[in-house]
């Protein structure tokens, strides 16, 4: 227990020291390039001085991608920190104008050398502390005739104690400087906060689209299973019961009554299942598109519905499904709550936007925050990055407007 407590500062210190040592070596090439023109016999004229400054700087800028990749590899292999590369702009001019490029250049010109200097100081402290802490070990390597002249027991004890304390300090400093190095590299060599948020949003949007598509595919699968399985069995049952009624005239009245009741229940179950299947994902929507599917909704509605569909090109299947259920749920709300005499449905594609408008001449007063089906409609539209709005003053009319992206 005590040994674990004493050795705690040294956990990971070796890896941190290796990171700092490799970092110091990695900074040598750019520093040599910058210092080369200023060696003895360097520039003395104004133009040569400008060239001595600008040419190495241009070389450093050109080598920035390679230097940054080397630093990322150092952090990944020596410290287990993965620094993703920022998005690279296409072309030389956009790359030179990119803020990410100059963040990396500043790292290699200023931050990297300062961290390398700090790392060298820590490594020198490691060396000096190791030598001091092992005073009593290397003293015995001195020839006996010189040993007593060079050593002092009390002084050597102080030096050893100071060396042990410096070892603990070096371990702490190595870990702290390594973490600072990793943090500085992440800020300068990796994507900015804005780029990270943009990547996160893009990733979440892609995952959300995959979830929505998978949910829609599962809904279609359930619809096919019900249509081809349970519904067909119920149809077969209803046919058999109908045949039994027609071909068995001599049945007792009680038995005929039971068959009649079962036949009626089977037909009711077929109708309910058909409505359920149609509510999950109508087959006509997948086969013939929104125009045909919405025409079926308009025909089944208990009030006159004027339908206008203008779709020169079909949107994605997921968007089609959302638009279908928007119209279906909106018309259901009209029938249940609006006390309207007619409704209008308009679906048109404007560029990459699918515009759906459902209006009625009812009493109005609809509120999407009231916990009605409008809340579910708004959530369904939001799941595909669409916009939902409703205008329903008291006394009417009510207009539901939905904009959906045609591709998801």
Image (cartoon, helix red, strand yellow):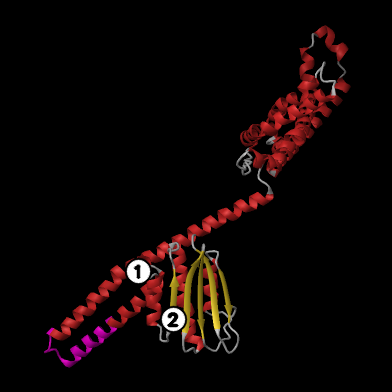
* Picture coordinates of residue 129, whole percent (x, y): 79, 26
Q: Nearer the viewer, residue 369 or 242?
A: 369
Q: Residues within 10 Å of mark 2 (few under 14, many from 20)?
A: some
The N terminus lies in quadrant: top right
Residue 283 is labelled as: 1
The x and y percentages for residue 37 are: 78, 21
Give the mark nearer the N terminus: 1 vs 2.
1
Q: Is residue 73 left or right of residue 320?
A: right
Residue 354 included in the magenta stretch of the image: no
Q: Secondary structure at mark 2?
A: strand
The secondary structure type at the circle numbered 1 is helix
Q: Residue visible at 64% across and 35% down?
A: 65
- Asked if residue 263 lies in the magenta stretch, the reply is yes
Closest to the camera, between mark 1 and mark 2, is 2
Residue at 72 percent of width and 37 percent of height: 181
Measured along the vertical axis of the image, is residue 349 above or below residue 112? below
Residue at figure coordinates x 75%, y 33% from the top left = 109
25 vs 123, nearest the viewer: 25
Residue 129 visible: no
Residue 251 falls left or right of residue 366: left
Q: Position of residue 102 (x, y in %)?
A: 72, 40
Q: Which residues are magenta?
A: 247-266
Residue 163 found in image quarter = top right
Question: Could you tell me residue 185's position as x and y percent?
Answer: 70, 39
Q: Nearer the viewer, residue 363 or 280?
A: 363
- Residue 252 visible in the snapshot: yes
Residue topped by disc 2: 306
**Residue 365 figure quarter:** bottom right
């Amino acid at each position: 227990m005590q040994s674990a407590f004493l050795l705690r500062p040294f956990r990971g210190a070796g890896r941190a020291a290796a990171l700092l040592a490799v970092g110091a070596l990695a900074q040598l090439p750019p520093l040599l390039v910058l210092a080369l023109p200023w060696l003895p016999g360097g520039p003395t004229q104004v133009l040569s001085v400008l060239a001595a400054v600008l040419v190495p700087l241009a070389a450093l800028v050109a080598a920035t991608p390679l230097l940054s990749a080397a630093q990322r590899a150092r952090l990944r292999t020596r410290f287990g920190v993965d620094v993703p590369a920022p998005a690279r702009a296409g072309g030389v001019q956009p790359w030179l104008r990119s803020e990410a490029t100059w963040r990396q250049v500043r790292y290699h010109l200023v931050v990297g050398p300062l961290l390398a200097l700090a790392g060298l100081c820590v490594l020198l402290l490691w060396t000096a502390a190791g030598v001091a802490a092992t005073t009593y070990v290397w003293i015995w390597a001195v020839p006996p005739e010189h040993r007593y002249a060079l050593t002092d027991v009390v002084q050597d004890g102080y030096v050893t104690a100071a060396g042990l304390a410096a070892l603990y300090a070096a371990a702490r400093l190595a870990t702290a400087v390594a973490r600072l190095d990793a943090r500085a590299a992440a800020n300068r060599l990796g994507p900015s906060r804005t780029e990270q948020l943009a990547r996160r949003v893009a990733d979440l949007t892609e995952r959300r689209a995959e979830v929505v598509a998978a949910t829609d595919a599962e809904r279609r699968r359930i619809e096919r299973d019900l249509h081809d399985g349970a519904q067909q069995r119920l149809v077969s049952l209803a046919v058999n019961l109908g045949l039994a009624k027609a071909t068995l005239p001599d049945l007792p009245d009680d038995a005929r009554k039971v068959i009649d009741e079962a036949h009626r229940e089977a037909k009711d179950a077929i109708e309910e299942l058909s409505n359920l299947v149609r509510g999950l994902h109508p087959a006509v929507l997948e086969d013939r598109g929104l125009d045909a599917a919405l025409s079926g909704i308009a025909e089944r509605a208990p009030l006159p519905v004027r339908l206008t569909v203008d779709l020169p090109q079909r949107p994605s299947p997921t968007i089609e499904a959302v638009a279908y259920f928007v119209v279906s749920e909106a018309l259901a709300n009209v029938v249940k709550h609006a006390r309207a005499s007619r409704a209008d449905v308009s679906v048109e594609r404007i560029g990459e936007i699918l515009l759906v408008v459902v209006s009625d001449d009812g009493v109005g007063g609809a509120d999407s925050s009231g916990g009605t089906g409008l809340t579910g409609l708004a959530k369904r539209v939001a799941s595909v990055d669409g916009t939902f709005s409703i205008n329903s003053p008291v006394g009417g009319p009510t207009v539901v407007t939905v904009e959906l992206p045609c591709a998801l």
